[in-house]
Amino acid sequence: MSRRELVVLGTASMLPTRDRNHNGYVLFFDDAAILFDPGEGTQRQMTRAGVSATDLTRIAITHLHGDHSLGLAGVAQRLSGDQVRHTVPVSFPASGEPWVRHLLDASAYDHHERVVLQPVPAVAPGAVVLPRVPGERGDEPGAPVLSTRPLAHRIDTIGYRLDEPDGVSLDPAALRAAGVPHGPAVGRLRRDGVLALDDGRTVRLTDVSVPRRGQSVAFVMDTGLCESVHALADGVDLLVVESTFLHRDADLAERWGHLTCRQAALVAASAGVRHLVLTHFSQRYRVPEELPEAFEREAREVFDGTLTVAADLDRVPVPPRRRP
């Protein structure tokens, strides 16, 4: 059975706290496992969460502030020490390449990792689809597509969106009615789109299938409100979004290039997001007096879908597929 869930490694913004590690998130999506924004302490959080370095198929960094990238050094050395055999692309805003290279070579170790740098232009208009690289795991037909859009922060920053292509699902009742036998015949029908039966009849895939809408996940970190935030969130099943400040501190959010909880929830509501995950909380808010209760109350004023105010080591499933 395929695995589709978000594993939350850390939820703090600039400074880690007693209760919250720096950022870090792993999205498991079938054969893919994308590590987003490995902040300081990510390697240890992976161990606590039961995430292996061999699971990782890509590292995706939104920007090169430390709370989103300092853990890259340890994760790269873990990939080397565990001698991960597949290629692991590292995507990031192109202007951050010097810092990425420094982090990958931050200390002395035997380099057995198979990391490929994939700089992304952070000022490109519209979406940039990230190509697969040779040796990357999970590059099968129908694999989901990862794209980026530029965000509005104090340094070059990109957001990510994963989209599964639309497809079809076979209808068991229609298969039985058409007389299609179980086993290899079903595989041939799915592969070829048509199947010749022993009695001379022909069954087409369109006759025994229903449309299957692809699933989507968006990851939006440090940014002020901009067109790309809405584009990334549009209609996704799961939106992971920064919620650094409560709206009473909107002046701080604007000054430092962040979203408030209310802004993030309004985006999710207008975009038709099914499950909203709020994260990246400022250390200024007290636990448990304000986190998670105050953030949940503020988000619920404008968003009535499924809501998670993330905590470290949470596991958040991607919502079940929409019915056609």
Image: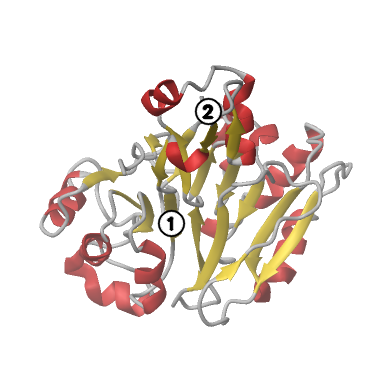
The answer to whether residue 85 is above or below residue 230 is above
- Residue 300 location, x and y as percent? 13, 52
Q: Is residue 44 visible?
A: no
Numbered circle sitting on residue 262: none
> Which residue is most to the top?
182
Residue drawn 25% across the image and 77% down it = 251
Q: Amino acid at mark 2?
A: Arg
Residue drawn 56% across the image and 66% down it = 63
* Secondary structure of residue under mark 2: helix
Q: Residues within 10 Å of mark 2 (few under 14, many from 20)?
A: few
Q: Which residue is mark 1?
A: 218
**Residue 7 relative to residue 38: left or right:** left
Residue drawn 10% across the image and 57% down it = 301
Q: Residues within 10 Å of mark 1 (few under 14, many from 20)?
A: many
**Residue 105 relative to residue 291: left or right:** right
**Residue 21 relative to residue 86: left or right:** left
Residue drawn 78% across the image and 40% down it = 86
Q: Amino acid at mark 1?
A: Ala
Q: CA distance from mark 1 to mark 2?
A: 25 Å
Judging depth in this view, the residue of 64 and 35 nearest the camera is 35
Q: Which residue is mark 2?
A: 48
- Residue 27 location, x and y as percent? 51, 43
Among the two numbered marks 1 and 2 on one chain, the one whose residue lies closer to the N terminus: 2
Q: Which quadrant of the figure has residue 219?
A: bottom left
- Residue 183 location, x and y as percent? 59, 17
- Residue 239 location, x and y as percent? 36, 53
